[in-house]
Structure formats: structure tokens, C-alpha cells
Amino acid sequence: MTIHGPVFSAMLQEFDGAARLLNLESGIWKILTHPKRQITVSCPVLMDNGEIEVFTGYRVQYNITLGPAKGGIRYHPDVTLDEVTALAAWMTWKCAVAHIPFGGGKGGIICDPTRMSRRELEALTRRYVAEIIDAIGPEKDVPAPDVNTNDQVMAWIMDTYSMHVGHTETAVVTGKPLELGGSLGRKEATGRGVMIATREAATHLGFDIKGARIAIQGFGNVGSMSARLLQEAGATIVAITDWKGGVYNASGLDLAALSEYVRQHNTVAGFPQAEALTNDQLFALEVDVLVPAALENQITMENAPSIRAKVIVEGANGPTRPDAHMHLHERGIMVVPDILANSGGVTTSYFEWVQNRYGYFWTEQEVNDRLEHKMCEAFNAVLKTATKFNVDLRTAAYMVAIDRVAAVTRVRGMYA
């Protein structure tokens, strides 16, 4: 099936530039730009009002050359097959950059979970898993949380799968509750990866993370964890924005007080120990580091010219538009791309999978130490490629990823 959707086309645009620099042969090029498997299922659910609703679900396994497909499941009204396919492709490259033995997968169900009861969500989850049961498993495809899904949803998936196979199988999903085989350190992992990537970028650019001034867009899991860990590393967090507003304090925000305020008000807006701030103002601040950790397509040609940060570290997926990225690169502003900067989450998901299959669990310090090693390894591989080919870090990250998947594809050969 040929895909012409805008999201998948954006992925292809990034792929093509890197593939050309690698002189990728046409046969491998064709293989790596087509999803291996796209599954569409109908999920009938008996709703609380007695009516039956039928929800459409997707699971895409983009590439499994390096290992089982890996990627989250999202519940959202705007889920499309195009989006899920592109996200599965990005997971392929993210896992390859992180140098972990996973391919790329993604799932989604078209629904509005904010309008559904807990019982309805559980019923939908279990029916969806039953519909894709033959395609998932510890050695086939390992789902994880994504937009509007969490550790409870993963517990339902694990239980449903286990009931079908006749034994408890914790390794079928990651992002589970600790009681069911989740990993210590997983909650902080994406933010910790952002912190490590920021520290390594600062070292390369010749400034110390200690005392560095940092602005962060987004205060969800990734934004809040990144802020806390960067502060612990010695940085000063001067500005944070979220869905409702923003706050700025030139001397540094009191994160403990801010977190308590957010717990009570569900937003940073109105925090009394800081000045009010908009997203546009945040992007224009003269800071050392800007961390977009909210939604996609936040840095565009409308605001990129006003950015004055030395380095942008992408905590979110796809926060920078391609034309804005080129503009920033031409101005000498380093952008650490999402498939590198926020790969701490999938790397620690890999650790969870390993621990489940091994039947032995590491301490939180062991998890963090292993993540530190993998993130530094990945950053150095991308930086080395960027230097060798004189390209930006995003192009270099895709080159590293594509080269690794292509190399294994060649060695494995083609089954016919």
C-alpha cells in the first residue's frame, strides 16, 4: 500500500535527505520506506448507556529488522493510519539511534477517552488487544503508553494477553505499574535523557551545564522531569510555559513550589513567585538552552527568527518544522533532534523488557547508570557523523539510524 498522508510524507522528507548522503542503494531505500504491516481492526464495545459503539483501531509494525516492533498506543479522536504509520517509522529510527534491538511500531484507537468511563476504556482496551493478539508479543511487538494511555492501560493489555496465552507474560508491554514488572526509573527516563543530551551538547559547545539558563515549553512528564533533573545538574530554569500560560523568573524558578502550585491548579499560569510569560516570549528569551517538551510543530518560521538560545533540545516529538530547523541551523543554533534527545524513554522501556525476560530487576541506580551509558553512546555516534559529513544533528541522527537498519537488512538478505 502506498501512503500519501502529510505526516508520513514529512517522515519521508527527513529520510530522503539522510539516505542520499549515505548513497543508499535503491532496493534498500524501497524496503525502508514501506511499512511491513498495517493492521486495521473494528472494536465493538457495549457502552454504559446500553448502546454498542464500534471503534476503529490501528497497529503498524513499520520495520522489525533489528528486533520486535516497539512503540506506544494512543487514544485520541484524531488518530489516523497515516499518523500511526509515520510514528511507527520514527520509532524505527529512534530505536536504531539508541542502538537497542527493537524495530518500530505504533498503535492507536479513534476515540475520545475524556468522554468514556473507566469500564468503557477497559472494555475497549481488552477488545483491541484481542483483535491484534496474533501480532503482538515479547518477541513480535511490544506496546507502551502514549497519548491518553498510561500504566493502567498497559496492565489491562498485559492481563488480556496473558489470559489468551495461558500464562502471565509481563514482557508483552512496557510502561507497566511496578507491581506488574515495571522498571524503576522509567517515569523519569525521558526527562533524564533530555538532561543528558543537554549536558553533552553544552560540553560540545563549550559551556557548562552548571549555571546555564534554560527555558522549557511544557510541564507534563517530560517537561517537569527535565526541569528537575537539569536543576539538579546545576542549571537555572528561568521560564516554563504550558497549555494555559507561562512563568518567568530571571533568578530561577522555585521548582518545588511551582510543582505544588501545578498540583493544585493544573497549570503554571498564575504562579505568584514569577512574571507571566507567553510561548512567543519564551521562545525569544536570551537563554543557553531551549527545551520544547510540549506538542509537535511549535517552532515555525514565524517564531524561529526570534530564537536566541545556543542549543535547542527536543523533548517533544516533532516540535520543529523542517524549514524552521534549516533556518536555525544556518544561524548556527544547534538542534538536538527528538529521535536522539527524547530516546531515554524507549531505552528504559528496553531495560524493562530485558528485566521481564530475565526475571531479575535492577536497582534504580543501575537503570540510571545504564541509561547514562546508552545516551552518551548515542549522542557521540550522532555527533561523530555530523562532524564527518558536515551536517546538522538531525540529518546525522537519521544517517546513523538508517545505516544501522540498512546494514542488518543487507546481512539478513531477502527471503523470497
Image: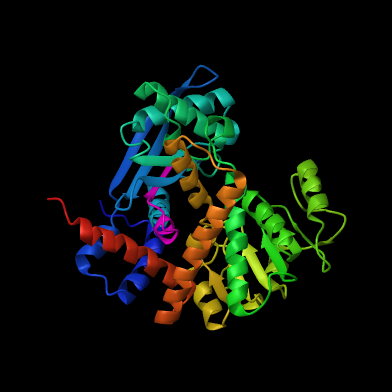
Q: Position of residue 282 (x, y in %)?
A: 71, 67
At x 66% / y 49%, what residue is drawn?
A: 220
> What colour scheme governs how the chains and residues are painted in the rendered image of this protein?
rainbow
Which one is nearer the viewer's eye here, 12 or 310?
310
Relative to 38, 302 lies left or right? right
Q: Position of residue 412 (x, y in %)?
A: 21, 55
How many numbered marks does the figure carry? 0
In the image as oriented, which residue stretches furthest toward the right?
272
Q: State yes or no: residue 322 in magenta.
A: no
Can residue 73 be seen here? The reply is no
Q: State yes or no: residue 104 in magenta.
A: yes
At x 60% / y 78%, what residue is drawn?
A: 205
Relative to 390, 345 lies left or right? right
Q: Which residues are magenta?
A: 93-108
Q: Position of residue 226 (x, y in %)?
A: 66, 57
Relative to 24, 415 lies left or right? left
